[in-house]
Amino acid sequence: MNVYESPEMYSTELNMSLAQAEIRLAHFEKAREKMKQSRQCPKCQQYTLKVEGGEWESGVRDWVYCANEKIEKTDDGGDSIFVDCDFTDDVKNEYLFAFHHDFDAVLMMACGLDIHDEKAVLHNIGEAWSKFVEKDTKKFTQLVNVS
Ligand SMILES: [Zn+2]
C-alpha cells in the first residue's frame, strides 16, 4: 500500500487532517518534479545527471556527473560512435535532485512508532503527534518554492 496514492489515504494512515495531507502531498509532488527537472545536463540536455558520493576520509566531496554514454559522434573514418558526455560539476543548490527535498519526516517517524499511542509518541519525539505534524507541515507552506 502506498500512502502517497491519495490525500485521504495519507491523512488516515498518518493521523492528520485532510488539509494537512493535501499540503504535504502537493509539496512532495512539486519537489519531485523539480528534482527531476534539475537532472537535466547543461552539456547534453538529457535528464541524466547523477550525484556520486565522495569519500570524506580522503577529503573528496560529493560531485555531480552526467551518466549519458550515448552521445553520437562521427569518428575520423566517418563511422558513428558513442561517447560519454563527461559533464561533471560540484554539488550546487540548483542540483535539487542531490538533496532530499522530498524527505518525509512524518512518514519516517510513523514507520517505527505507533502514532496512536500518545505516550509512546511523546516519549520518542518529545511532543504530541499533532504538534509534530503541524510543525513539519508548516515548513512546507513557508517553503513554497523548493529552489
Ligand atoms: Zn550530459
Image (spheres, rainbow, N blue to C red):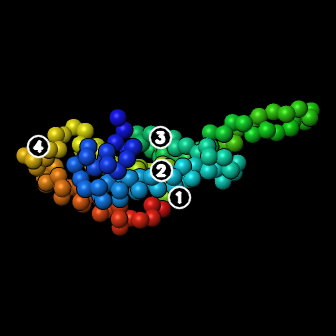
In percent of width and height, residue 3 lies at 34, 42
Of mark 3 and mark 1, the one earlier in the sequence is 3
What's the amino acid at mark 3?
A: Gly
Of circles 2 and 3, which is in front?
2
Which numbered circle lies on residue 117?
4
Query: Residue visible at 37% across and 47% down?
Result: 6
- Distance from disc 2 to disc 3, alpha carbons, whole Å, reads 20 Å
* Image quarter of residue 23: bottom left
Does the rendering let one see residue 52? yes
Query: In the drawing, does residue 34 fall left or right of residue 113?
Result: right
- The N terminus: image quadrant: top left
Query: In the drawing, does residue 41 fall left or right of residue 70?
Result: left
Within 8 Å: ligand 1 and the Cβ of disc 3?
no
Of circles 1 and 2, which is in front?
2
Circles 2 and 3, Cβ within 8 Å, touching? The answer is no
Which numbered circle lies on residue 94?
1
Label 4 sits on a secondary structure element that is: loop
